[in-house]
Amino acid sequence: MATRSRSAAVTPSVAPAAPAPVTGLNEAESRIYHQVFESVMSQRLAPGTKLPEQGLSDLFGVHRAVVRKVLQRLAHDRIVDLRPNRGAVVAEPTVQETRQIFEARRLLEAAIVPLAAARATKADLAALRRQLREEHATLHQQNQPAWARLASAFHQRLAEIAGNEVLQRYLHELISRCSLIVALYEPPGNAACEHDEHARIVDHIEKGEVAKAIKLMDEHLLDLEQRLHLDRPQSEKSLGQMLGLG
């Protein structure tokens, strides 16, 4: 199995690109969305952290209506929960919900792998290899949100190759929920989704070893689930500090 600790960080040679606008949000709203999203994915905002409209309005210098729209979008994307008469909090999946989500994902990807193996062309495999090289490079840059997106993109690309749009839609939702859970509960210093295991899955697919690819995918996802620490303590930092604003 791949080594669990990350390699020493390498400073990127260029500054990261600005976050892309979020569909349906204007520039100011997208900025707030990304700040909250990145703070959750980098583990600065802990599960259950309150996100008061007035507090966010003051921190970002915008009207509460702007914050409310952003929180509604974050809730739609399952990053936060909107609770009646209690406001917004960072999503806090239960242990039972976490187990059920990972169980569903393992079953779904076990169906996707053989379909992808049957349909994958040489061009598809070459594109997967290029994607894995980018994934490996990002692993060394200490950019957890970017790395998590690339790692998730590998699984989504397999679903695209499989050619079943229904399975692809279901997987997209499950990956989004798993990504949040991993970001909230993965111990610091671990790669959220092992690069070497991705490469070995492609190796098996390329060799026609479908049963081995399915087995490795199942072990890969089960191992990820078992590394989660679901008892993470609440932070004592201020909301501004957790958002990286102070």
Image (cartoon, rainbow, N blue to C red):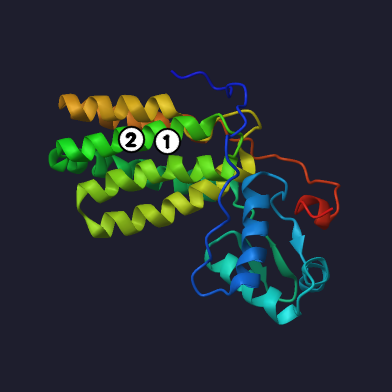
- Identity of the amino acid at label 1? Glu
Residue lying at 43% horizontally and 29% vertically, measured from the top left: 195
Reply above or below: 7 against 52: above
Q: Which numbered marker is on residue 134?
A: 1
Q: Which numbered marker is on residue 209?
A: none
Give coordinates of residue 8: x percent, y percent.
62, 21
Cα–Cα span, label 1 and label 2: 6 Å
Left or right: 205 in relation to 12: left
Residue lying at 64% horizontally and 35% vertically, measured from the top left: 229
Give coordinates of residue 225: x percent, y percent.
50, 36
Can you say which quadrant of the picture contains the N terminus? top left
Residue 233 placement: quadrant? top right
Query: Is there any visible trace of residue 103 in the rendered image?
Result: yes
Residue lying at 34% horizontally and 32% vertically, measured from the top left: 217
Q: Which SS class for mark 1?
A: helix
Query: Is there any visible trace of residue 209 in the rendered image?
Result: no
Q: Which numbered marker is on residue 130?
A: 2
- Identity of the amino acid at label 2? Arg
Left or right: 227 in relation to 171: right
Residue lying at 69% horizontally and 39% vertically, measured from the top left: 231
Q: Nearer the viewer, residue 232 or 236?
A: 236
Give coordinates of residue 22: x percent, y percent.
52, 66
Check if mark 1's residue and mark 2's residue have beta carbons within 8 Å: yes
